[in-house]
Image (spheres, rainbow, N blue to C red):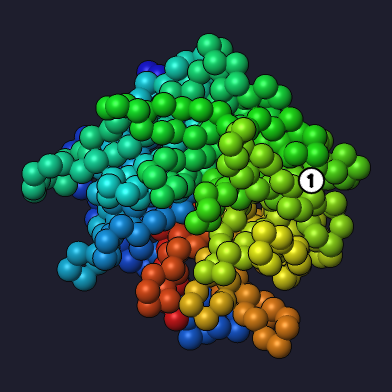
Amino acid sequence: MGATMTSYRIHDHRTCHIRPASRLAGILLVTTLVVIFAAGPVAAQTFTILHNFTGGADGDSPTGGLIFKGTGNLYGAAGDAAVFRFHYQGASWVLNPIFEFNGTNGAFPYGRLTVGPDGALFGVSYYGGIPECHDEAGCGLVFRLQPPQTFCANPFCFWTETILYQFNPLNAPRDGYGPNGGIVFDSAGNLYGTTEMGGEGDQGTVYEITRSGGGWVENSIFQFDSGPDGGIPNAGMVIDQAGNLYGTTYQGGDPTCLFGDLACGVVFELSPTSSGWVETVLHTFQNGSDGADPLGGLIADSNGNLYGTTSIGGANGGGTVFKLTRSGSNFTFSVLYSLTGNPRSQIGPEGLLALDSSGNLYGITNSEGPQSAGNLFELTPSGGIWIYTDLHDFAISPSNGAYPHDGPTLDGNGNLFGTSLEGGTGNCPYGCGVIWELTP
């Protein structure tokens, strides 16, 4: 990739850049703590900036959220190259880079990482690998990261990457490219994910990767065409105990939808059968009170009910939070809450929701709120309705984050953790983004 600046576009319609990958220069990154209090009615909660991304070895502009692996260990990715471990040490949080992509072995790890059955980290990179896609920036790949086998006192002891699959639509016509979102595992250890583009309809795919001998084999199990079946998935999926997959596309569905170029998206189910995978469209967004353009994917509760968001539309224009209630093999769609926003200048929820043990939902908007830089919200069920609480308003400033792209992550004590694309004190025009925490 050299030192060339390559533009890529995130779905909030702002342009970011891929920077040269060689950025380590022996820097140990120790976080700075800045404590402020959340605006609005929940004054008892505390919003804390745990880390300011610098645009160096730690990366910048994280698009994916954070995951826990073990106690007090968060993992994520930032920018085109950096994968990091973020852990509590002594009296503060410390960020250590654990892997750096160079373009050939991946670039722009999009979405959250996943902890595999073997304890390794799995993820996808939107670019990198075989170069024939994205103006030679690469078609994307699926990777596995494994920690050093022996103890290493050096904070820059990098993990070892194994490339499970490099997407190659030129030689495999059904193959997708541009993998995005996270991946999920079934009970047999096979993994599943989505690509934003490629496939026979060039509107994205769902793929399966299985072990074969000492390697891995990829199979494109479904091709979207932006018709009634949906098009262009922008997030990962969830899987139930029977091996059925559930996800969203932000295009396709109802062709009369007024938002976007190719309809407003769908919620889909893919079920394995003896003759292959079969899709069932669980809901088609129609541009009205149900919302449009779901970008954040789905989560599931212990009863198999599904929750998700739309980034625009709804009764108040700012997107929706919805639920698909399971009854046997059937689902009933309902809107839990319609957010307030301007679909021409603001984007609502883009990332995954978080669900606590009391049934409360937590989410983010990308560019709504009083500063038009996003906000963090809670939805609480009460007497058959959902009560909305604005927990924190983001803003472009050294003491805040701005434009969060993925949703929050909950720990066992009810603390929320997340990232933002901009804001903070890093050496980027509007800050390089932050890692934040909200404590009860």
Q: From what the image shows, is residue 208 above or below residue 29?
A: above
Viewer-nearest residue: 102 or 268: 268
Residue 424 falls in image quadrant: bottom left
Viewer-nearest residue: 132 or 146: 146
Q: Is residue 58 left or right of residue 365?
A: left
Query: Looking at the image, which residue is at 49% across and 62% down?
Result: 408
Q: Position of residue 182 (x, y in %)?
A: 48, 45
Q: Is residue 301 left or right of residue 264?
A: left
Query: How many residues crowd around disc 1 within 10 Å: few (fewer than 14), some, or many (20 or more)?
Result: many
Q: Position of residue 171 (x, y in %)?
A: 53, 11
Q: Position of residue 262 (x, y in %)?
A: 80, 36
Residue 410 falls in image quadrant: bottom left
Query: Looking at the image, which residue is at 62% across and 65% down?
Result: 305
Residue corresponding to mark 1? 264
The residue positioned farthest toward the bottom in the image shown? 383
The residue positioned farthest toward the top in the image shown? 171
Query: Looking at the image, which residue is at 76% across and 34% down?
Result: 226
- Give the amino acid type for the residue marked by disc 1 in the picture: Cys
